[in-house]
């Protein structure tokens, strides 16, 4: 078949004329294929899926009810542009109640269609060719992808166990610091599960001022904080002078598919991101914004979500430890990040976390997500489907039986 004429037209940023011809299979696609394969090969074996990074629960009943009401109101039908004032006010109320952060909802808050688009758009505000975005790895890559789209560079800051999974800002080379414009952080951190401290944020603020970089703190998992009180970067003195924080209805409110979040912080940065957003989308459906107000004003929702995932993580940590894994209860998120086994007692060796993960799926129908960016680790998510606590316990028991039989070696 001859090539379409536009094969030569694809932009270099997505691969140029080679676009669509690569044979490399990305990690998540590899996992999907392995899952399909093992379900076909072993229909008798229950698939135990710790690979899903999405809430298993539906949005709360009162939120769905509000949505049902709002969907029928004609005043909600149109473009929402940069968002309705009532949602911004509700987000500001939540920031006050949850983190003790006072914001002007008019100038310091703006809605977005989830955290992902906000992270995709922030480089448009700051990155010119040759500029640098500092990003922690392993992590959520979206801001880095768009940095490269604009001709910028990504400097990776590895999150290592020996540094408490906090980036080593002092170790950044002088030339990189000079060209850096953005520092993208994510606490509670995915996938390591670590939460930030006030002292760490103070160091970040000092770094931002000294080297004149803008801080983008991805707080998507903030409601899922188990260690200490939830902490906003904006609650630390000076934070709001150097950056913004991105929040979402996805994780803490079980509204992952509804696509709604907000960014807040320094009014000039909020304005710039809102301007780019206004040139990219026309806002989230107003009925969704109004349903989200019900969620934000109901303090019981994030507590319920947090308690469920904490309970599941505690069971998972205890079970994995009994099977030889070295792991502790994470400070936040619904992920557990544990060193990957290097092999099994019967002599099998894994060259990296990806090999260990593939073995667990193919041979034992246990799905995990491998990370090899900063030492081989497996990510276990507790967003599996289980109807009640008995079902959770049953799943833990089944996993334990399989892992004990494998006898992993570390
Ligand atoms: C670290 C991190 N940031 C951002 C997002 C995107 O969240 P949202 O659903 O708000 O777009 C995710 C989603 O999984 C995430 O894990």
Image: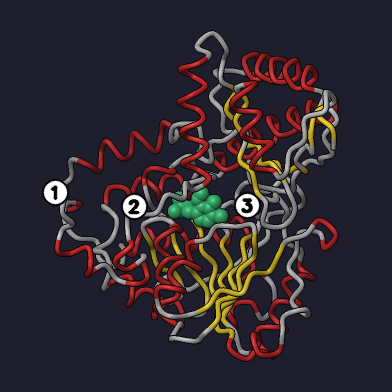
Task: Classify mark 3: helix, strand or loop.
Answer: loop
Say which of marks 3 and 2 sits in front: 3
Color theme of the render: secondary structure
The answer to whether the beta carbon of the residue marked 3 is less than 8 Å from any atom of ligand 1 is yes
Residue plotted at (85% across, 59% down)? 162
Q: CA distance from mark 3 to mark 1?
A: 40 Å
Find residue 256 and report its horizontal and vertical position in percent. 44, 43
- Residue assigned mark 1: 74
Q: CA distance from mark 1 to mark 2?
A: 15 Å
Q: Quadrant of the C terminus?
A: top right
Mark drawn on residue 289: 2
Q: Is residue 273 left or right of residue 179?
A: left
Find residue 229 and report its horizontal and vertical position in percent. 72, 53
- Is residue 11 shown above or below 350? below
The answer to whether the beta carbon of the residue marked 1 is less than 8 Å from any atom of ligand 1 is no
The first of marks 3 and 1 along the sequence is 1
- Disc 3 residue crowd, few under 14, some 14–19, many 20+, Cα 10 Å: many
Residue plotted at (65% across, 55% down)? 189
Mark drawn on residue 61: none
Find residue 157 and report its horizontal and vertical position in percent. 68, 69
Q: Nearer the viewer, residue 119 or 87?
A: 119
Say which of marks 3 and 1 sits in front: 3
- Is residue 377 shown above or below 2? above
Quarter of the rendering containing residue 330: top right
């Amino acid at each position: 078949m001859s090539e379409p004429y536009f094969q030569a037209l694809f932009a270099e940023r997505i691969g140029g004329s080679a676009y669509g011809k690569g044979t490399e299979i990305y990690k998540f696609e590899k996992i999907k294929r392995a899952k399909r394969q093992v379900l076909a090969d072993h229909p008798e074996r229950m698939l135990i899926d710790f690979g899903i990074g999405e809430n298993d629960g539906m949005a709360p009943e009162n939120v769905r009810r509000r949505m049902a009401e709002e969907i029928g109101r004609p005043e909600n039908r149109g473009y929402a542009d940069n968002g309705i004032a009532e949602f911004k006010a509700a987000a500001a109320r939540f920031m006050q109640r949850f983190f003790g952060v006072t914001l002007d909802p008019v100038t310091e808050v703006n809605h977005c269609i989830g955290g992902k688009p906000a992270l995709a758009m922030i480089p448009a505000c700051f990155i010119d060719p040759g500029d640098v975005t500092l990003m922690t790895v392993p992590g959520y890559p979206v801001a880095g992808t768009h940095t490269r789209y604009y001709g910028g560079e990504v400097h990776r800051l590895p999150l290592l166990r020996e540094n408490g999974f906090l980036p080593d800002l002092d170790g950044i080379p002088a030339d990189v610091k000079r060209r850096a414009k953005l520092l993208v952080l994510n606490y509670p951190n995915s996938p390591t599960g670590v939460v930030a401290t006030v002292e760490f944020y103070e160091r970040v603020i000092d770094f931002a001022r000294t080297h004149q970089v803008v801080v983008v703190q991805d707080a998507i998992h903030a409601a899922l904080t188990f260690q200490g009180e939830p902490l906003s970067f904006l609650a630390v003195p000076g934070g709001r002078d150097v950056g913004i924080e991105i929040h979402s209805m996805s994780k803490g409110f079980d509204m992952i598919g509804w696509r709604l979040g907000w960014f807040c912080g320094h009014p000039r940065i909020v304005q710039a991101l809102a301007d780019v957003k206004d040139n990219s989308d026309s806002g989230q459906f107003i009925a969704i914004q109004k349903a989200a107000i019900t969620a934000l004003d109901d303090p019981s929702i994030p507590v319920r979500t947090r308690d469920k995932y904490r309970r599941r993580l505690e069971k998972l940590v205890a079970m994995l430890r009994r099977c030889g894994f070295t792991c502790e209860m994470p400070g936040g998120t619904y992920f557990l990040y544990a060193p990957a086994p290097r092999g099994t007692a019967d002599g099998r060796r894994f060259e990296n976390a990806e090999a260990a993960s593939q073995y667990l799926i193919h041979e034992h129908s246990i799905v995990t997500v491998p990370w090899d960016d900063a030492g081989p680790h497996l990510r276990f998510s507790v967003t599996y489907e289980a109807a009640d606590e008995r079902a959770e316990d049953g799943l833990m028991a089944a996993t334990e039986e399989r892992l004990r039989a494998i006898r992993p070696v570390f």
